[in-house]
Image (cartoon, rainbow, N blue to C red):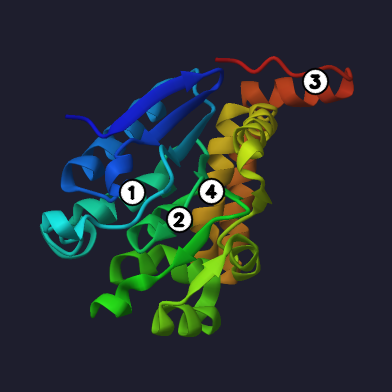
């Protein structure tokens, strides 16, 4: 039985975590189903963005501990299925938008931190709750620490305290807070902004964000210059520049 729904709405694929009776807690099957949905969206040229959200009162309560799910199981490091899922969020050529409709705890916050753009309802609460279970936020820390930094992590990881959507903006986890009624409209706004850019350019910009920070400064400048040179002569770039000069919307090549 699938606990993940996949819908296409205009230029976006919507991945809905659909296990509301368990507050969308992540089972092993759900992790695999989310990964499959991301792969499906990645392969669809008509999809410009991917939205991940929850059905019911929660976004994601983390691992399904009642079912005995162990997010550290099935191999250490990047072989772990949950680690591979978080990496898929990062390597997916389409921007991933997390629409946080309800509480996000533990592994659910890993999904939030791995997304490119995060919109949260104003009444949402978050928590890195692992220490209160005698655990640590180990796997998700790979995605979370670059977002919030060690300073904020000390307070949030060590206490497991709950924090609000507005606090999450300050920590660097959330970009935009809106009312629950306006969540989908806010997501549609972000999708429309993404669709104004060239598909290749958006995908390459996402790679740029991921790869440049890890390079030494001189190497980063050389790589950035070469990267730009690769794109300048592309059909997409020629159309984008022509549209700008002619003061018209671009017609991106498929």
1 or 2: tag closer to the N-terminus: 1
Looking at the rendered image, the quarter that the N terminus falls into is top left
What number is the disc on residue 103? 2
Between 42 and 16, the one nearer to me in the picture: 16
Relative to 182, say whether 114 is above or below. below
Q: Residues within 10 Å of mark 1 (few under 14, many from 20)?
A: many
Q: Is the C-beta separation of discs 1 and 2 under 8 Å? A: yes
Pointer 1 residue: 23
Pointer 3 residue: 242
Between 7 and 182, the one nearer to me in the picture: 182
Give the CA distance from mark 3 to mark 1: 49 Å
4 or 2: tag closer to the N-terminus: 2
Give the CA distance from mark 1 to mark 2: 9 Å
Q: Residue at x 27, y 56 (%)?
A: 83
Dividing the picture into quadrants, the one containing residue 192 is top right
- SS class of the residue under badge 4? loop
- SS class of the residue under badge 2? loop
- SS class of the residue under badge 3? helix
Between 1 and 23, the one nearer to me in the picture: 23
2 or 3: tag closer to the N-terminus: 2
Relative to 2, say whether 35 is above or below. below
Relative to 60, say whether 1 is above or below. above
Q: Residues within 10 Å of mark 2 (few under 14, many from 20)?
A: many
Q: Is residue 211 left or right of residue 239?
A: left
Q: Is the C-beta separation of discs 4 and 2 under 8 Å? A: no
Q: Is the C-beta separation of discs 4 and 1 under 8 Å? A: no
Give the CA distance from mark 2 to mark 3: 46 Å
3 or 1: tag closer to the N-terminus: 1
């Amino acid at each position: 039985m699938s606990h993940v729904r996949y819908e296409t709405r205009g230029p976006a694929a919507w991945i809905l975590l659909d296990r509301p009776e368990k507050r969308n807690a992540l089972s092993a099957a759900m992790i695999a189903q989310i990964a499959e949905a991301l792969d499906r969206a990645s392969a669809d040229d008509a999809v410009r963005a991917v939205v991940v959200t929850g059905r019911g009162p929660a976004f994601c309560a983390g691992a399904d501990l009642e079912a005995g799910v162990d997010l550290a199981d099935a191999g250490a490091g990047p072989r772990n299925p949950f680690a591979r899922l978080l990496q898929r969020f990062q390597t997916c050529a389409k921007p991933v938008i997390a629409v946080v409709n309800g509480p996000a705890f533990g592994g659910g916050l890993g999904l939030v931190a791995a997304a490119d753009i995060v919109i949260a309802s104003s009444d949402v609460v978050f928590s890195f709750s692992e220490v209160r279970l005698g655990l640590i936020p180990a796997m998700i820390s790979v995605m979370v620490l670059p977002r919030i930094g060690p300073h904020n992590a000390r307070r949030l990881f060590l206490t497991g305290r709950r924090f609000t959507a507005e606090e999450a903006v300050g920590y660097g986890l959330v970009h935009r807070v809106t009312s629950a009624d306006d969540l989908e409209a806010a997501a549609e706004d972000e999708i429309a902004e993404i669709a104004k850019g060239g598909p290749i350019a958006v995908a390459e910009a996402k790679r740029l964000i991921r790869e440049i920070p890890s390079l030494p400064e001189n190497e980063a400048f050389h790589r950035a210059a070469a990267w730009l040179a690769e794109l300048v002569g592309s059909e997409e770039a020629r159309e984008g520049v022509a549209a700008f000069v002619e003061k018209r919307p671009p017609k991106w090549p498929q």
